Amino acid sequence: DADVTQTPRNRITKTGKRIMLECSQTKGHDRMYWYRQDPGLGLQLIYYSFDVKDINKGEISDGYSVSRQAQAKFSLSLESAIPNQTALYFCATSSREGWGPQHFGDGTRLSIL
Amino acid sequence: EDQVTQSPEALRLQEGESSSLNCSYTVSGLRGLFWYRQDPGKGPEFLFTLYSAGEEKEKERLKATLTKKESFLHITAPKPEDSATYLCAVQARSGGYQKVTFGIGTKLQVIP
């Protein structure tokens, strides 16, 4: 089984819908991250959490929200999806010692029509 | 603003033809530089961490090196299974907090 599991793997939805992407991990790491990846751009940090009670905005948090339900679970929500949020979304984890190395899930491909 | 630039954007090699990928960075307060490999449809997979200029790390046909301004990922006698996109990321301290900045990547294709 994968150490970092993202669900769903693919999602097509319509503008204005609320969407939740889920991430769970079995690595026992405290730190979890959400990134988006667009063609021609590097991975961009949306939100990160260093423990269950600690949530921080990344560089592109507008239009997104997160929930850290437990050490192993970190969800990303798009409250009202818009087409320019179409992207590949990755969840990652790292140990307490620092931001990296990070361990990534296999991503959710999200298309908003 | 922290910047990470990878070159070339794409590289096509014959099997056995050694080459290097470049990652140049402009950051203040470098805390670490990471190399990842990303296969199509997969998340990035960690390869190496380098912390200080002069440091080198090796794994099979890959060797990563670090200077004060750039890092190289040397690929010796590559095989088709080395085909992937290689990402560089820099962890730096800025304004009292740390952040990681990723490059766009180099897409490597190794032809049999």
Image (cartoon, grey):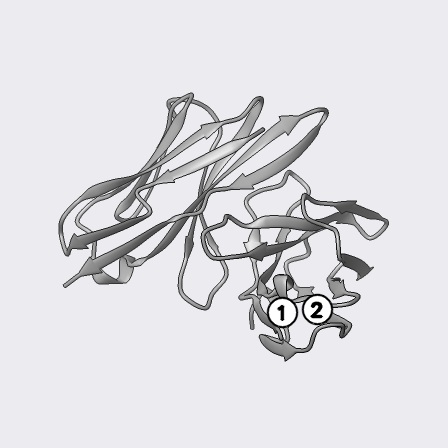
Q: Going 42% across and 36% down the picture, which residue do you hit?
A: B5
Amino acid type shown at disc 1 = Gln
Q: Is residue A82 left or right of residue B24?
A: right
**Residue position for label 1:** A6
User: Could you tell me the amino acid type at mark 2?
Assistant: Glu
Q: Chain of mark 2?
A: A
Quadrant in which the C terminus of chain B is drawn: bottom left
Quadrant location of residue B73? top left
Q: Nearer the viewer, residue B50 or B99?
A: B99
Tell me if label 1 and label 2 are in contact, CB under 8 Å: yes
Determine the residue located farthest toward the right in the rendered image.
Answer: A53
Name the mark on residue A22. Answer: 2
Tag 2: Cα neighbours inside 10 Å, few (<14), some, or many (≥20)? some
User: Looking at the image, which residue is at 45% across and 68% down?
Assistant: B41
Q: Which percent across, then down, holds residue A50? A: 75, 46
**Residue B103 in picture, x, y percent from top left:** 46, 42
Residue located at (48% from left, 56% from top):
B44
The relative height of residue A19 versus residue B52 in the rendered view (above or below) is below
Looking at the image, which residue is at 73% across and 50% down?
Answer: A61
B81 above or below B95?
Answer: below
Identify the mark nearer the N-term, 1 or 2: 1
Give the x, y percent position of residue B93: 63, 27
Q: Is residue A41 above or below residue A23?
A: above
Left or right of B27? Residue B65 is: left
Task: Give me the C-alpha separation between circle 1 and circle 2.
Answer: 6 Å
Rendering quarter of residue B84: bottom left
